[in-house]
Image (cartoon, helix red, strand yellow):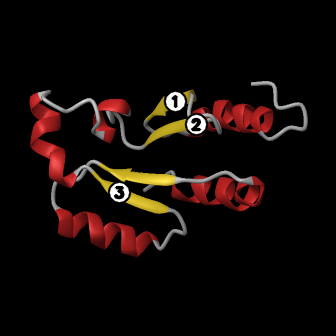
Amino acid sequence: MASFPYIEKLYEKYAPQGLRFIAVSCDFREERWRSGAKKLGSDWYNIAFVNNYQKYHQGVLDSNDIEYKYPCQGIPKFFIIDPSGIVIGRWDGYSSSIEIGINELLEKVFSSENKY
């Protein structure tokens, strides 16, 4: 996972200030998801779409499903959600160029002025 070193840096920098990560896997095989999550050894939550994989691809998700609320078209998918639960940023896939947008938004979120 090419983005993992970048995500680790964000975690080290912002976790003490309250940033939390949730890793969501779109893998439909539970054993692969569990193995991957264990291999990464992260300190954040890891969840998977395992049980809803078929529903997700058939487009019949329930509005209470996390996949419905936060669809995963690109891997990885980044969401920045403010403390009140509002999505204030989202990115699909990973490249070093998206780091700029994520860094700028996180700087605003965690600045003393907190004007995002």
Q: Distance between the residues labelled 2 and 3?
A: 17 Å
Residue 11 or residue 1, whichever sits in front: 11
- For the N terminus, the quadrant is bottom left
Left or right? Give the position of 73 relative to 108. left
Assign the C terminus to one quadrant of the image. top right
| Residue type beneath disc 3 | Ile
Q: Name the residue under label 3.
A: 47
Describe residue 92's horizontal placement relative to residue 72 as left or right.
right
Give residue 80's mark.
2
Cα–Cα gap, marks 1 and 2 = 6 Å
**Above or below, 94 relative to 25:** above
Q: Quadrant of residue 110?
A: top right
Rendered location of residue 91, percent (x, y) = 50, 31
> Which residue does the image show at 70% across and 58% down from the upper left?
15
Circle 1: residue type: Arg
For the residue labelled by badge 3, is the local secondary structure a helix, a strand or a loop?
Answer: strand
The answer to whether the residues at label 2 and label 3 have Cβ atoms under 8 Å apart is: no
Q: Check contact, mark 1 vs mark 2: CB within 8 A.
A: yes
The residue at 23%/53% (across/down) is: 27
Q: Residue at x 18, y 32 (%)?
A: 61
Which residue shows up at 14% across the image and 27% down it? Answer: 59
Residue position for label 1: 90
